[in-house]
Amino acid sequence: MTEVRDSSANYMADTELQLTPDGWTHVQLYELVTFVIGGDWGKRPETDDDEYVDVYCIRGTELRNWKTERARTAAHRKIKKRSLEKRQLAEGDLILEVSGGGPEQPVGRVERIDRSVLSQNSEYPKVCTNFFRKLEVTEHVSSEYLAKYLKYFYQTPEINRLQGGSNNLRNLKYPKYEKLRVLLPPLNEQHQIVEKIDELFAELDQGEAALEHTLTLLERYRQSLLKAAVTGELTADWRKQNAANTETGQQLLDRILQTRREHWESEQMAKFEAKGKIPRTDSWKKKYKEPAAPDTTNLPELPAGWAWASVDQVSDVIGGLTKNSKRNELPLRRPMLRVANVYQNQLELDDVHETGLTETELQRVRLEYKDILVVEGNGSKEQIGRMAIWHNEIDNAVHQNHLIKVRFFEKDLSEWAMCWFQSMHGRQNIEQVASSTSGLYTLSLSKVRSLAVPIPPLCEAHQAAELIDTAFTESAQLETHCHTELTRSKALRQSILKDAFAGKLVPQDPNDEPASELLARIKAERKDAQSAGKRKKKRG
C-alpha cells in the first residue's frame, strides 16, 4: 500500500463522534491495517492444472445471510497457488465489499472472518472474490471492534460520499475509504465494548427472530385462508344453507357467456351503423367466436354448484398504451398507470405520470371501477402476474401496455378473482401459463385470457371475499406492527453502536494504556516494517 496520503481528509461515521472520550484517540483506517489485497475469483473447480489449488470463494451473495449461514454457500473455485499465499483468509481478517451494490444498497459492506466461517468445508482454504478486498488488521487492535465500527459507518449517510460507478454496479472509492477516521479506545476497552455490543445484540436477535416468525405465520395463515376460500371449505356451511335457493356457478357462467355474446353483437351493430351498412339478415352473428374453456389439469376439484371458466369467458382482456415520443404533442392528457404503480393486491400512486393520447385510444385504455390490472412481465418468477383492483383512486386514469386490464362482465367477481390468483393454486396457474422454453416468464393478452378461474354462485363469492377481506385487514395490522418493531430494532442497533463509539456503553478505566500510546507503538512498528522492506528491496 502506498504511504502518500492526504492527511487533511476527514471521513467520519458521525460528526457527533468528533469529541474524543478520555484515553481515546482518532486514527485513520489505513493506520490500523497491515496488509490489503483484492480477492480472486479464479477458475472453475474442474480446471486441471497443477499450478491451481481448490478453494472456497466468498461472494457478495454470502453477505445476505451471513449471520446464520457463515459463508456456507461460498463457491468452489480454483486459484493459483501463489495467489492463495497472499489471499488466504485467516481468523480476524476483514473482507470489505468494493464493487457491487445496487440502487437501494450502497457498496462497502464489511464482515469479519472467524472460526465458524473457516470451519465451513474446513479442508479447503477460504478466499474472497475480486469484488472484495481482504484487510489484515494490526494485532494491537481488536478486529472485532474495527469490524463493528465499519459496520456502523456503513449504515450512516457518509457511506454515500464514497460511492462511484453506476447506480446498478457501484464501486467503493477505497483510497478515500481508507482515510476514514476511526475512534480508537484503549485495547482493554475495545474488548469490553465488543462484549457489551454482542450481549445487547443477542437480546435484539431474539426479539427480531420472534417478529420474523410471526410474519411467517401470518403468511401461512393468509395462504391457508385463501386455499380454504378457493376450494369452497371456507363457505361450506353457507353453501349447505343457501345452495337450493341460489344460482349455481354454472348458471352464472352461462349467463355471463350470454352477456359476452350480446356485448359482441352490440359492438358489431354499432360498427355497421357507423358505416351506414345495416345487415338485412343475422348471418353475421355466426362469426362470433366462443371463448375457449380453460385447461383444468392440476387444478383442484370444485365443490358442487361451482364451475371452471377461463378469464376469456368471463371478462374483456385489454392491452394498454405503447410508448410513443409523439404523445407529448397530443392535446388530450390523462394520468397513466405504469408497472411501478402496481404491486400484489396494492396500488402505489404517489408517482403517476401523465401521457398524451387520442380519443380512440381513450375508449380502449381508460380505467373503470373494479378493473384488475395485471403486470405482464418481470425478471422474478414470484413477481410475474402481480395484480391489483382499480377503485377509481384517480379520475380519468389510463394504463400503459405493460399492464394488462381485465374487466369482468360481472364486476362483483373482481374481488373473488383476486382471492383465487393470490392463492397457491392461482399462483401455480399463472406461473404455468407464463413460463416458456427459454426460461423467461411473461404474460401476454392470450396467456391472461387462458388463465383458469373457479366460478362459485355469486352470493357465495361475495361471502368468501368478504371473509378474506376482514381477515386480511386484521392480519395486516399485526404485520404492520411487526415491520414497525423490526425497523425500530434496526435503529436501536445503530443507536447502541453510536453510544459504543462515543464512549457511553462501558465505563472508562483510567488505568488502561491510553490509545495514543497504543497508536504510537503501531506507527513505530509500521515504520520499522517499511524500513526493513526498503532495505530488503535495495539489497535485492
Image: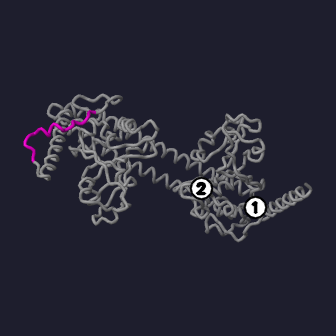
Q: Amino acid at mark 1?
A: Glu
Magenta segment includes 167? no
Q: Can residue 422 be seen in the rendering of this structure?
A: yes
State how the image is colored.
Answer: one colour
Separation (CA) of disc 2 from disc 1 = 22 Å
Residues 77 and 119: in front is 77
What is the quadrant of the N terminus in the image? Answer: bottom right
What is the quadrant of the C terminus in the image? Answer: bottom right
For marks 2 and 1 on the same chain, the one whose residue lies earlier in the sequence: 1
Instruction: Name which quarter of the figure residue 279 lies in.
Output: top left
Q: Residue at x 77, y 38 (%)?
A: 51
- The percent position of residue 421, horizontal first and vertical second, equals 34, 40
- The percent position of residue 479, horizontal first and vertical second, equals 41, 48
| The magenta segment | 278-293
299 to 157, vertically: above or below:
above
Q: Amino acid at mark 2?
A: Val
Residue indicated by mark 1:
31
Tag count in the figure?
2
Instruction: Name which quarter of the figure residue 28 lies in.
Output: bottom right
Q: Secondary structure at mark 1?
A: helix
Q: Can residue 473 be seen in the rendering of this structure?
A: no
Residue indicated by mark 2:
107
- The percent position of residue 23, horizontal first and vertical second, equals 74, 65
Of all residues shown, which one is farthest toward the bottom? Answer: 8
